[in-house]
Image (tube, rainbow, N blue to C red):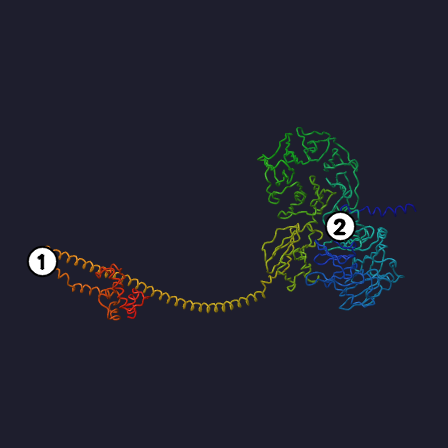
Amino acid sequence: MFKKIVILVIFPLCIKAQNTIGLPEIINYSKNQYNAGAQNWDIRQDKQGVIYLANNEGLLTFDGKTWQLYPLPNKTIVRSVLIGNDGKIYVGGQDELGYFSPNAFGKLVFTSLINAISDADRNFGDVWDIVSYKKGVYFRTSNKIFRFLNGKTMAFTAPGEFAYLETANDQLIVHDYEKGLLYFDKNQLAPLTANSMEGLQLPKTDGVTAIISIGENKSMITTLKNGLYLLIQNQLTKINSPNNALFSNERIYAATVVNNEWIALATTNGGVYIIDHSGNIIQRFARTEGLQNNNILSIFLDKEKNLWLGLNNGIDFIANNSAIKNISPQLNEESGYTAMVQNNQLYLGTSNGLFVAPLQPAKDISFSKGSFSLVNNTRGQNWNLQQMNEKLLLGHHDGAFEIKGNSAVPFSNYAGFWNFIPYRNGIIAGNYKGLLFIEGSTQTPIPNFNESSRFVAVDANLNTWVSHPYHGVFKIDSNKQVTTYGIKQGIPSTLNNHVFLIKNKINLATSNGVYQYNKETNQFEPDGFFLNLLGNKSIRYLKEDKEGNIWYINEKNIGVIDLTQDQPQLIDIPELKNKMLSGFEMIYPVDENNIFLGGERGFYHINYKKYKQNTPQLSVQVRSLKIGSDLDSLVFGGYFNRLDLPAIQLEERIPLINYDFNSVRIDFAASQHGSLNNIEYSFRLKGLENNWSAWSLRTEKEYTNLSPGKYIFEIKGRNNLGNESAVANYSFEILAPWYRTSWAYIIYLLLAVAALLGLYYWQKKKFVQQQFRFQEEQKKLVYIHELELSKTDGELAALRNEKLEADLNFKNTELASSAMHLVKKGELLTKIKTELNQITKKIDNEYAITELKKMIKTLGEDEQLDEEWEYFTKHFDKVHSNFIVSLKMIHPNISNNEIKLCAYLRMNLTTKEIAQLMNISVRGVEISRYRLRKKLNLATEVNLFNYLIAIGNDDATEQ
């Protein structure tokens, strides 16, 4: 009895310990990351790859980049979710059910179906399952199942209490605690299995948690407390598996298909178990393997065959279908340095010992089940494993060991062995202090060489090449002569050089690309093959596999030059970026299904053949468009149509964006959740740019200050194998500012017409005004002209007057001269007469006296004088406008002497000059003037000169 108890206690523990040695990557999403409730009750995925989870706080979505929460109107827990055949996202909450569908802005909005249920049935509690069957959608609560079909609602009441609802083998099956398994037969629930007298029935205290079809008319049924059952031809049987006790203890809460042979069980106590149809455990994922906790509420297999887990607190993603697995002998507590497969055993050398695990017959070693054990005497730093003559040698910090059975036996006491390389009939071993030649029991150090020899290669001429990352490159020939190679020998730098034998050639991985040794020139030169493929990248490690592919490490990136096709192909392995042990990289290719790599936390295994084949079709989608000063106003929420329709933007759903918000941010993603880090994107905005952007990992793009117009954002993705997705696009239009709209242009046109009319009338008015002003100006000009003419005439008259006055003055001068001449002449004659009279008195000759008297008489005659006066008056009248004539007409009684006096006065002669002309004294002139005034009857106040001046001028003016 005691033995049985021990077996029952230990057996499950043994089962738990037996797991596959390789485990896929597990990504943990905490509630702080997805920013929603802790519990996740159900999971689904749409055609575009977006994940939907029934969360405590609403419907939670994840597109590979962004988490988005859509709460229900009553803010209750969402227990179930289903992507319907009609493209609607059905959800069930507490006393609430309905569906989400995209609105005109591409954002999911909720439509409640509660009003389609009768008032009496609306307090139904939680909706635990939603199933699409034929054309109807079924919502399961504990007491009711509601069917929505063709716009009609029908409620089915539980005989006892409903526990589960699912389709299997073209039947809609429901489990009731009281009646067991039932199925829908038209509009009624009918028993699925035989009655209790004829067959096995499910316990009434245990509920079904999954019904999975595993063949024609054959299903696996999981229960919460009683493990696994088979339903074959409607007959229920218990699966005869020793693991059923374990599953009963772990409590199966959900299950899903993994592939045609495996099923994943989600438990509330033990995490996830991958089993076959017989209940045998293939793999197990629990907290020790990387889950956040062991309480799994929901499980889902996505399109890429990877698993999503809805946890009691968080969400986990298991890259179950990934070709890359992690192998860790001590649960990621050690770094991996070396690996070797020998005699169906896997040896892994770590920083804390050498571990070994038995291998099962499998192409993919990572699926071998078992546990690692420590090889005795290997604690400490392990550096290298190498097979030599069917022996397994271990390079260790403490020396060189041979692995025999489960122990390491030392065969060299030299410290620190890096590697072992066949050399003639022995071994060249690189160690901390140089090279050691081992042949049988003889161990001989290479003389004159003490460099630490971690990188060693032997060429066809038995030259041993050693590189030290900081001290240079060395060649030790067969005669043990050491030659140092540096910059003079073509090496780009003395630092960071690593020597390898690739394709039977000595290659040097440097910080400036890969170089090869040229024996003819004894120089290193760039290797054309690597140069064409890798350029001048810094290469730290090279390894050739059995298929001839060349694995390399560039900085912290791992890649492969794949030579299995006609043309070399570069394949990056971005999943392992930054995970290798920097400075101590190790790649151990067993075959195309098994490539081992040392990592910072254990080892990584790549099924390279599967890796190249595991290429799901890429699908890129625009997930949002935001505008605003902070680019936080959502214009497009990621959904073009219902989920059952192609993701094509309809013409009427092209957003028109106000010019004030002409800066946009576009988010995009490819929902390939198993290879998110492998996808690069290229995009362009048609209408702004014609060329595609360079490939990059960024999943958003911002455009600022876009001009008005129509734009099409195009995006495509490419994975690390070079496969490209179809181009996805999203159209939008930036509206012109209000001052550039059609209405604005119409207003501008009207304003322009009004302006032209106004301008016309203004010009017309201006023209009239100008014409008026012109006429006024003309009148002014005419007036001014007339004034100028008048002024000219006046000036001409003045000039004439001046000329006349000048002429008058000249004539007066002539007259004065003439008058003076007459005066002088008279004086002369008087003087002559006086002289002649005196002469006559003095001579006695009578004849002479007689003659003189005649002469005196002649001189005294007045005729000549009268002629002279006549001449004077004639010219005086011409000058003074017939003054004398006019004077005589006015004063006919005036005498000649008075006329002469008037003439002399008019000429403005002085009194003395007048006295001389009239041959009288000055007093005589004044008396004559007095007499003249009386003669002319002039009043005392009248100026004689002015009076005389006036005479003749009036007559001249009149003439």
| Disc 2: which residue | 28
SS for tag 2?
strand
> Where does the image place residue 341, in percent across and percent down from the top left?
74, 41
> Between disc 1 and disc 2, whose residue precedes?
2
Question: In which image quadrant can residue 381 be found?
Answer: top right
Residue closer to the observer: 118 or 141: 118
Q: Amino acid at mark 1?
A: Ile
Dot 1: what SS? helix
Q: Nearer the viewer, residue 265 or 339?
A: 265
Q: Residues within 10 Å of mark 2 (few under 14, many from 20)?
A: some
- Depicted 33 relative to depicted 468: above or below: below
Please rate how many residues cluster around mark 1, counting C-alpha atoms within 10 Å: few if below 14, some from 14 to 19, many from 20.
some
Q: Is residue 526 above or below residue 908?
A: above
Q: CA distance from mark 1 to mark 2?
A: 179 Å
Residue type, label 2: Asn
Which residue bears the numbered disc 1? 849
